[in-house]
Image (cartoon, grey):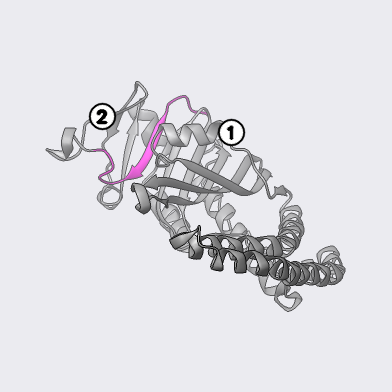
Amino acid sequence: MRADIQGLMEGELGNWLSGQQSMREAARAKAHNRWFYGGIAALPVLAFLWFAPWFGNFKIVLAAFAFLGVSAWGYMPIAEAKKAIKTGINSAIARHFGIAYSHDVTPGAEYEAARTYGLLPGSDREGFEDCWHGTLEGHGFQLYEAHLEERRGSGKNRRWVTVFRGVIIRMEFGRRFHSTTLLQRKGKHKKWLGLGGRADHASFRGHRLDYVDQVHPDFEDVFEVWSDDQVEARVLIHPSYIEHLLALERAFGGKAVRALFARGEVILAVESRNLFESGSMNADEDHARVAEAAEQFGAMAGLALAINQNERGRVLRGG
């Protein structure tokens, strides 16, 4: 799946971006004014904190908070401008592929299913953005980014640690099925205390999935399959999928792709870097940013479709 970047830039998107230059300039001016006047307002406060005898060793901390507060307040207009440009670019790319885009997203049942069956780790704070949704080649499709964090440490060492950053993909599968089948990286589920190697089954909130023996040794070296229907699992997950799954990782510098087949859908989780960041304050970067975001989405969607099947079992080939 490839986008016509030149056509996008010479058409509606290019015209829209040309009209955003004044918005960019206004955002920069507003940010600079906020930094200037915020700094002026903060100076007497900082002077009072520095010479007052009551704050002791907290002077530096309070001064740092004041500096960060003014910096964040000043940057807000730039952040809003970049978000508006990013939304405009990604929306145009989505329309090009016949779907829709929204910057903000509220996860649905696919997110809970991904957490329940171990596609995603536990977390204490979650953030979601960049939702692409609609129908691709006759399949209901949704893709969005997730950033999951966990609070670790204690006292002064307490900090937020990223435990997952990547994309979650939900797609209607190309053939009917009734089982629940989990595709995980090898070694994910071991016997009690990790003794004795791989477990024979795994339980997810009381739902037992048994290990599925595979016939292809290359497949078993990388992935393991768990299901409540051994026969259907072998039909759904063919060893040839390994190339598509690994290509999905390589395309985005990702790792540990995993999948869940349930309720007639396939849910994929792929760890990767932050994607689809097409917003920029520099108009000279627009073409490159459009091309990068379009390539990222086209490759991700195309590979997801390649993993899917139609009613006859033919693998759908994404570009």
Image quarter of residue 275: bottom right
Q: Is residue 180 on the magenta stretch? A: yes
Percent across and percent down for residue 286 are 72, 72
As drawn, the label of residue 108 is 1
**Given this view, does label 1 or label 2 mark the residue nearer the observer?**
1
Residue 138 seen by the camera = yes
Check whether the beta carbons of the residues at disc 1 and disc 2 lie within 8 A of each other: no
As drawn, the label of residue 168 is none
As drawn, the label of residue 201 is 2
Q: Is residue 185 above or below residue 21?
A: above
Residue at the (59%, 52%) spot, across then down? 301
Residue at the (67%, 46%) spot, across then down? 104
User: Which amino acid lies under the numbered mark 1 shown in the image of this protein?
Assistant: Gly
Q: Quadrant of the C terminus?
A: bottom right
**Residue stretch rendered in magenta on the structure:** 175-189
Mark 2 falls on what kind of element?
strand
User: Which amino acid lies under the numbered mark 2 shown in the image of this protein?
Assistant: His
